[in-house]
Image (cartoon, grey):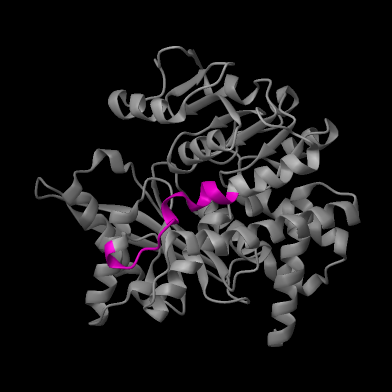
Amino acid sequence: MAKINPFDSALKQLDQAAKLIDLDADTHDRLKMPMRELHVSVPVKMDDGSTKVYEGYRVQYDDSRGPTKGGLRFHPDTDINEVKALAFWMTFKCATVGIPYGGAKGGITINPKELSEGELERLSRSFIRQLGDFIGPEIDIPAPDVYTNPQIMGWMMDEFSQIHGKNCPAVITGKPLEIGGSEGRGYATAQGGVYCTINLAEKLGFGEGSTVAIQGFGNAGSYMAKILTEKGYKIIAVSDSKGGIMNVEGLDPAEVEKHKQGTGSVQGYAGAEDISNEELLELGCDILVPAALENVITEENAGNIKAKAVVELANGPTTPEADAIMVKNGIVVVPDILANAGGVTVSYFEWVQNLANYYWTEEEVLERLKPIMDKSFELTWANKEKYGCDMRTAAYVLATERIAAAMKARGM
């Protein structure tokens, strides 16, 4: 099957919202193209003394509502179309939850699992040297994403600070707590998804013990599983890149995590049946949570989705063609630009704390996150009712109107 271009999917999502609100053609055209694309070579001195050069990207999509914001991923499949789509989604995600950022994304085409720690640090620092003139606390603020983590963000922040001759913690979020990270950031994406899930459950009448299947047991997926279990939901299946496991009586996410740490995969967990990622997506359950990569629900498998609702913790897990099928089948989808916005919202909190040099407790972070997620869900649901559309289009309407208003206010 030909590789799906995620940027094409992103533009189709915009087109649906633009048509619904009769968006003026000039604004629509501006939102179809990123403000800036950077392609950089990233040279790295390897442990054996050789130098390898990797391809890196940073796309700053739109800054009408503030400095651009978005993660950096290290992944062998990363390419410019993926990065453009992710930057687009970040633009609309920040607008959906009303935080004062535009959107950006970046990445390097590499498998970081093949690098030593020293090579990974040199790669991270080299990337920042290439991006140094184009990022900054008031310009563009990177963060972790797939296969990047707080330690990598720490190296990057340190490299930027050395280049500029002063400590610059606000240039990057998702850092270790010791150098300006925020309490609660590690599980913020999942926590935001949980708030959306609880709101959705109230709208659809799901009760305690509702069943959940989660594709992706990395940071976001594993935290989502643990928090939902604490809230009384039953996790019946989880998966990672190597495959999944299922137990209709429910799984203990903490024990599954211990098993994965010991074996490298969730598969082979005692008391559960091994299944494939494809099988997990098609399980009968109340809520399906795609928490891995983009384009996993397509027109090929959307008709087989048996979940009553989908909460998108991953970026771009559903193609527009799949969306149409699920809408027709009565499946409610909480879109990525709302469901996983808890991460960027707490990144925003981290940036604010860095600029003020005043830090909040974990409780204070959660007290600020919950009302933002709850309000954004309610505004999206209200648009869904007003326009008689699906939740994704409703969220895009909310975001597009906010971005268009910012453009107009600037006289752009």
Q: In which quarter of the image is the C terminus?
A: bottom right
**Residue 178 place in picture, x, y as percent:** 27, 63
Could you tell me residue 209's position as x and y percent? 65, 27
Q: Residue at x 27, y 81 (%)?
A: 164
Q: In which quarter of the image is the N terminus?
A: top right
On the question of residue 264 being in view, the answer is yes
Q: Magenta residues, as a range? A: 178-192
Of the pair 183 and 61, the residue shown nearer to us: 183
User: Splitting the image into 4 quarters, where does residue 329 fall?
Assistant: top right
Q: Is the magenta stretch mostly helix, strand or loop?
A: helix
The answer to which of 374 and 105 lies nearer the viewer is 374
From the viewer's perspective, is residue 105 above or below residue 48?
below
Q: Does the magenta stretch include residue 365?
A: no
Residue 334 against residue 289 in the figure, above or below: below
403 w.r.t. 187: above or below: below
At 75% from the left edge and 72% from the top edge, which residue is drawn? 27
Whether residue 214 sits left or right of residue 284 in the image: it is left
Residue 40 in the figure: left or right of residue 97 = left
**Residue 198 location, quadrant:** top right
* Total labels drawn: 0
Residue 148, position in %: x, y? 36, 50
The answer to whether one can see residue 300 in this image is no
Tell me residue 211's x, y (percent).
64, 26
From what the image shows, is residue 130 above or below residue 261?
below
What residue is shown at x 85% (from left), y 34% (from top)? 328
- Residue farthest toward the left in the current orientation of the protein: 49
The residue shown at (59%, 74%) is: 100
Q: Is residue 363 left or right of residue 90?
A: left
Q: Which of 302 and 31 is in front in this view?
A: 302
Q: Is residue 183 magenta?
A: yes
